[in-house]
Image (cartoon, grey):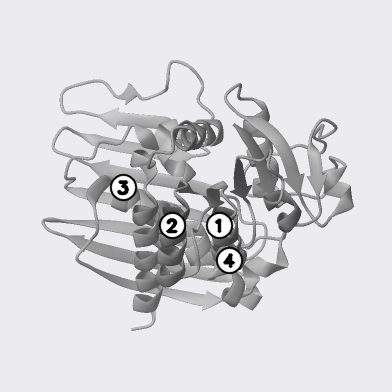
Amino acid sequence: MRIAVCGLGFMGATHIKAITASPAVTLAAVVSSDPKKLAGDFSGVGGNLDTTSDAIDLSSVKKYSTIEQTLADPEIDAVDLCLPTYLHAPQAIAALAAGKHVLIEKPMALNGADCDAIIAAAKAANRMVMCAQVLRFFPMYSVLPKDKPRAARFRRRCAAPGWGAWLKDKSRSGGGVFDLLIHDVDLMIHLYGSPRAVTATGYEDLAAGVDLIDAQFQYDGFTVSVSGGWHPGAYPFSMEYTIVTAAGTYDYSFPAGDPVFYAPGAEPQMLTPAEPVDGYRAQIEYFVQCASQNQLPADCLPETSAEAVRWTILMEEARWK
């Protein structure tokens, strides 16, 4: 499958590396208004994780300055939208109407109505759309069972981003909590379904680089805690979980180490995969597999990604009540 990556920021560069490492997909084109990035110079690109390079060889791929040029190219089968969130819905709908399959970086859109419009456009065009909720494909998260837990806690924190001024504009990004913790809310829904209610406390001052929340999602018989957000200064990125089940406790903390399972009467079990797994590559290969067969991405349905958007917005709204 021939794919075009639209948007060459931190996530676009990350996706390009994953695509070029996979024999299942061909990087056919890249799209950016920045000539420096189109030339393969990513020296000014940064993000939460060390997943990019200063330089990427793009000599063998087509280069477009607008998405419209890409959508008019009959050799492009799919587009990978690594754009600011406020562009997700209009560009995804346009790409689907042009007959392309679409992978959308998270969050799927800024609100539930836009998510629904994307899904409707995919059905009308008979094309596949998937949101890049990459946490589902990371081995440290894919080990978690879908059984009803006794308690669960997910946490994700980082410094306010110094790249992409749009991220600090809530009308374009949804804000720090929305953009960052959509990962954990999506995983929660993937594992346990939709909650009954949410309560939250926290603080927001995007101009000062602060956007924090501590939320409690209520399920029948258990509670899931989701907390974290943006901190001021050079605050390090971290993500973690503690999941208590009837069989034992799953615990993980990045950058401390691999996930560990603690069972009664047994030695701690390291849940390290036998072979290294690149979650970004696994995600894109799954998208390509589904798109090639024009099948729904059962492991990452767009309807579930839309539900995650709705609940993340409700979580934010609950913070102010």
Spatial CA distance of label 3 from label 4 is: 26 Å
Residue 50 visible, this orientation: no
**Tag of residue 97:** 1
Spatial CA distance of label 1 from label 4 is: 11 Å
Q: Do the residues labelled 3 and 2 touch (CB within 8 Å)?
A: no
Residue that badge 2 annotates: 124
Spatial CA distance of label 4 from label 2 is: 15 Å
Q: In which quarter of the image is residue 4?
A: top right
Q: Which of marks 3 and 4 is in front?
A: 4
Q: Earlier in the sequence, mark 2 or mark 1?
A: 1
Q: Are marks 2 and 1 in contact (CB under 8 Å)?
A: yes
Q: Earlier in the sequence, mark 1 or mark 4?
A: 4
Residue 278 visible, this orientation: yes
Total number of numbered labels? 4
Q: In the rendered structure, which amino acid carries the disc numbered 3? A: His
Residue that badge 4 annotates: 90
Q: In the rendered structure, which amino acid carries the disc numbered 4? A: Pro
List the single residue furthest toward the top: 274
- Residue 107 location (% of width, % of height): 50, 58
**Tag of residue 190:** 3
What is the crowding at mark 4: few (fewer than 14 residues within 10 Å), some, or many (at least 20)?
Answer: few
Q: Is mark 4 on a helix, strand or loop?
A: helix
Q: Is mark 1 on a helix, strand or loop?
A: helix
Q: In the rendered structure, which amino acid carries the disc numbered 2? A: Ala
What is the crowding at mark 3: few (fewer than 14 residues within 10 Å), some, or many (at least 20)?
Answer: some
The front one of 117 and 206 is 117
In this view, 25 is above or below 62? above
- Residue 51 location (% of width, % of height): 65, 38
Q: What element carries label 2?
A: helix
Q: Is mark 3 on a helix, strand or loop?
A: helix
Q: In the rendered structure, which amino acid carries the disc numbered 1? A: Ala
